[in-house]
Image (cartoon, rainbow, N blue to C red):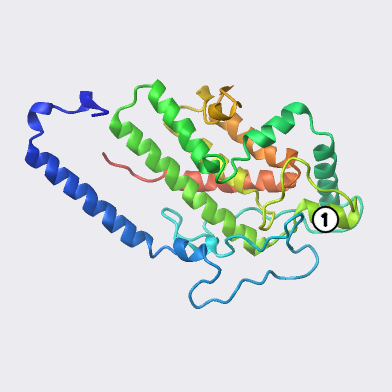
């Protein structure tokens, strides 16, 4: 038993144990049945019921498949999934990006130049940040799993009770789930082209990001920024805004441990890592952080009971 200090063995009979296990299994079945109606399992497939294959809009500034793989759009309907806390996927929209422009000296052109310049001359620290926070699915715990790992380590360091751990994990994962839904809704509504596309067309036709390939979905906002900002806001509320912690999520890969002064400091680094990698404009980072904090505020406004 993992939390023996929280149970009185003398009061836990075989009947109570069996009844508790049965209740847990029934609850899990009910949740899984309900989950099948949220749209998530359909969004993974090539087709969604009553919908045809996704065809991205065309036109100036619109997203198109990116090199080297030119893969089709990933999860174009994820933003239509049912959220847990948000009343709708538009409840926390990302602020509008700078107006699209191909003119040299325009705010949009300057943002693309910044991505190109930083990616070409990234410092060793910036390169490490980009790789540390990439959290590629299949290779790492994923971006969301990274923050769950952080939460687990902090809970362990504080000898948290089972009730405290359950509440923390619930708030954190609710926020990250809804953050990704909100981000994907904004991505496919705004449908902005990636830096590699813009740079190749108007700045440097031979350029591609060197650290990682551009993910196959629209640019704005940065999903890492949305999700990390939401996660940091929740953990800051639970543990304190000035809580320092050690991140052990990538110890097995030789990239840690790393210590951060606060959850917001880690989230800021995670967000900027996408700029350093050459796959997001700065406005996508900033706009994503605004959206993520909005989602977290909605989650933290919940009234929870133990």
Residue name at image x 54 percent, y 71 percent: 47
Q: Nearer the viewer, residue 167 or 210?
A: 210
Residue name at image x 27 percent, y 56 percent: 29
Q: Which residue is mark 1?
A: 198
List x then y, in percent, for residue 194.
Answer: 75, 54
Do we see residue 220 in this rendering? Answer: yes
Other residues around mark 1 within 10 Å, as few (<14) / some (14–19) / many (≥20):
many
78 in relation to 238, above or below: below
List x then y, in percent, for residue 185.
Answer: 58, 60
List x then y, in percent, for residue 294.
Answer: 53, 47
Taking 72 as reference, is 25 left or right? Answer: left
Q: Nearer the viewer, residue 301 or 198?
A: 198
Residue name at image x 48 percent, y 52 percent: 178
Do we see residue 242 in this rendering? Answer: no
Residue name at image x 8 percent, y 31 percent: 11
List x then y, in percent, for residue 279.
Answer: 73, 47
């Amino acid at each position: 038993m993992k939390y023996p200090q929280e149970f009185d063995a003398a009061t836990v009979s075989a009947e109570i144990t069996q009844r508790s296990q049965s209740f847990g299994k029934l609850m899990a079945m009910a949740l899984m049945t309900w989950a099948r109606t949220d749209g998530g399992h359909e969004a993974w497939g090539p087709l969604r019921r009553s919908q045809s294959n996704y065809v991205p809009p065309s036109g100036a500034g619109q997203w198109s498949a990116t090199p080297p793989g030119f893969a089709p759009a990933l999860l174009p309907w994820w933003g239509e999934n049912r959220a847990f806390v948000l009343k709708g996927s538009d409840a926390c929209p990302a602020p509008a990006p700078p107006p699209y422009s191909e003119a040299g000296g325009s705010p949009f052109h300057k943002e693309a130049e910044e991505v190109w310049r930083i990616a070409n001359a990234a410092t060793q620290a910036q390169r490490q940040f980009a790789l540390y926070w990439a959290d590629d699915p299949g290779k790492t715990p994923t971006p969301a799993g990274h923050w769950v790992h952080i939460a687990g380590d902090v809970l362990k360091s504080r000898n948290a009770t089972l009730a405290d751990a359950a509440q923390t994990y619930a708030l954190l994962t609710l926020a990250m789930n809804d953050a990704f839904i909100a981000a994907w809704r904004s991505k496919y509504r705004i449908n902005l082209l990636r830096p590699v596309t813009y740079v190749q067309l108007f700045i440097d036709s031979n350029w591609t990001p060197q650290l990682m390939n551009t993910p196959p979905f629209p640019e704005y906002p940065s999903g890492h920024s949305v999700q990390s900002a939401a996660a940091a806001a929740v953990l800051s509320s639970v543990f304190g805004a000035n809580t320092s912690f050690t991140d052990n999520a990538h110890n097995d890969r030789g990239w840690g441990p790393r210590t951060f002064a606060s959850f917001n400091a880690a989230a800021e680094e995670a967000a900027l890592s996408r700029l350093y990698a050459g796959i997001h404009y700065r406005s996508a980072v900033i706009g994503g952080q605004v959206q993520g904090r909005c989602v977290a505020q909605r989650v933290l406004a919940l009234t929870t009971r133990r």
